[in-house]
Image (cartoon, helix red, strand yellow):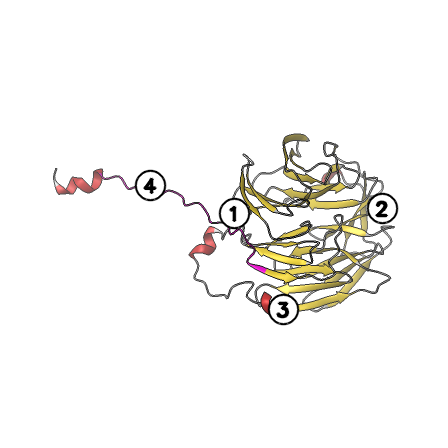
């Protein structure tokens, strides 16, 4: 065979995709004293400016994962607290702080200044918060869900009535067109923004009654529109998947323990769940097969809260054991892998905070 043809006929070997290494232990652990061991609250959030907020008792602390600096945002008076929810606004600068006295404070984290207080809408503690542009949606122990336009003085623009016990889960879809709400009444509601009415209580699009315990864990799929994952409490233990366009339940998986939180990977077709008794583990699932990819243990109490870093690679979890743990569970996104490593380890500062 002439040498000029030899190279043409040799097929290039296909490089098999290497299986991603998933560390089985947390990369960092941080003390979280006085964190409330309360399933119905939402006390951890990671904003798009790479700052993690955590509520410990009556105080909200901020940790800047880029610079390694930590600060106290606010300590509320005992008659207002404890803090029952925190949620970063879409700008990564403003943060909403829900309180036990039914009020919600808005803070500018850069200026370390309170912007305003939202009051008059709820009659009991505000345990869940969700932003949709300039609308802050609040869910309360009184069963009401309120859309607050934070730009205007009379901030209450819509009220959603459907739950008859406390609202513990609230998540807007990526497009901002649908809201999922979960409650201690075992109900999951889907609300459509286009159906909102300012002069009367808005009707839900779907009432989904399949869970047999409280529905706190909610996560909209980032790669498939109208796909919602929900998780049930100790009497249910199931992760369910919904087509919110039709209201159909697509799948249900019994995880064997209380589902406290759910997060989709931003980089792969994977879902992370956090659990209570007996293992207090984080479980990584392949979607849609729901094959278990990893079980991450270390927490000694139920893993109530999870939050995801802006680049999607790291997950922070907080538990009733008063620790905050960081897990490199989802891996580094492809774009970031090619970039030179200029910044220090994102959580190198953690050991210095104690």
Look at the numbered disc 4 and give the secondary structure of its residue: loop
Q: Is residue 285 magenta?
A: no
Sequence-first tag of 4 and 2: 4
Task: In the rendered structure, find residue 267 and report the number of the disc placed on it.
Answer: 1
Sequence-first tag of 3 and 1: 1
Q: Position of residue 117 (x, y in %)?
A: 81, 60
Q: Position of residue 325 (x, y in %)?
A: 61, 57
Q: Position of residue 74 (x, y in %)?
A: 75, 66
Task: In the rendered structure, find residue 14 and report the number of the disc placed on it.
Answer: 4
Quarter of the picture holding the C terminus: bottom right
Sequence-first tag of 3 and 2: 2
- Residue 27 drawn above or below residue 16: below
Mark 3, Cα crowd under 10 Å, few <14 / some 14-19 / many 20+, is few
Task: In the rendered structure, find residue 353 and report the number of the disc placed on it.
Answer: 3
Q: Measuring 83% from the left and 41% from the top, which residue is drawn there? A: 165
Q: Position of residue 16 (x, y in %)?
A: 37, 42
Look at the numbered disc 1 and give the secondary structure of its residue: loop
Q: Measuring 76% from the left and 48% from the top, which residue is drawn there? A: 40
Quarter of the picture holding the N terminus: top left
Give the alpha-carbon distance from disc 4 to disc 2, as whole Å: 59 Å
Task: In the rendered structure, find residue 142 and report the number of the disc placed on it.
Answer: 2
Whether residues under marks 3 and 2 lie with C-beta atoms below 8 angstroms apart, the answer is no
Look at the numbered disc 2 and give the secondary structure of its residue: loop
């Amino acid at each position: 065979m002439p040498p000029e043809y030899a190279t043409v006929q040799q097929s290039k070997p296909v490089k098999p995709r290497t299986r991603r290494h998933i560390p089985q232990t947390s990369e960092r652990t941080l003390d979280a004293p006085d964190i409330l061991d309360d399933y119905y609250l939402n006390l951890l959030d990671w904003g798009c400016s790479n700052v993690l907020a955590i509520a410990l008792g009556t105080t909200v602390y901020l940790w800047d994962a880029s610079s390694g600096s930590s600060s106290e945002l606010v300590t509320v008076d005992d008659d207002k607290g404890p803090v029952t929810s925190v949620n970063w606004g879409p700008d990564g600068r403003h943060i909403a702080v829900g309180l036990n006295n039914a009020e919600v404070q808005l803070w500018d984290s850069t200026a370390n200044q309170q912007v305003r207080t939202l009051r008059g809408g709820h009659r009991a503690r505000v345990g869940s918060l969700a932003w949709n542009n300039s609308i802050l949606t609040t869910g309360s122990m009184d069963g009401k869900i309120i859309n607050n336009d934070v730009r205007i003085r009379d901030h209450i623009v819509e009220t959603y009535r459907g739950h008859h016990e406390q609202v513990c889960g609230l998540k807007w879809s990526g497009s901002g067109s649908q809201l999922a709400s979960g409650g201690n009444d075992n109900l999951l509601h889907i609300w459509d923004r286009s159906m909102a009415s300012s002069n009367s209580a808005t009707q839900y699009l779907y009432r989904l009654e399949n869970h047999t315990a409280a529905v706190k864990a909610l996560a909209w799929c980032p790669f498939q529109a109208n796909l919602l994952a929900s998780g049930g409490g100790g009497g249910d233990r199931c992760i369910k998947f919904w087509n919110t366009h039709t209201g159909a339940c697509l799948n249900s998986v019994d995880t064997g323990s209380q589902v406290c939180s759910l997060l989709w990977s931003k980089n792969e077709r994977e879902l992370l769940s956090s659990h209570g008794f007996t293992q207090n583990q984080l479980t990584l699932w392949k979607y849609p097969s729901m094959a278990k990819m990893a079980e991450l243990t270390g927490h000694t109490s139920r893993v109530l809260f999870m939050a995801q870093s802006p680049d999607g690679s790291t997950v922070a979890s907080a538990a009733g054991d008063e620790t905050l743990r960081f897990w490199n569970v989802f891996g580094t996104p492809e774009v970031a892998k090619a970039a030179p490593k200029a910044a220090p380890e994102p959580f190198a500062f953690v050991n210095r905070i104690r």
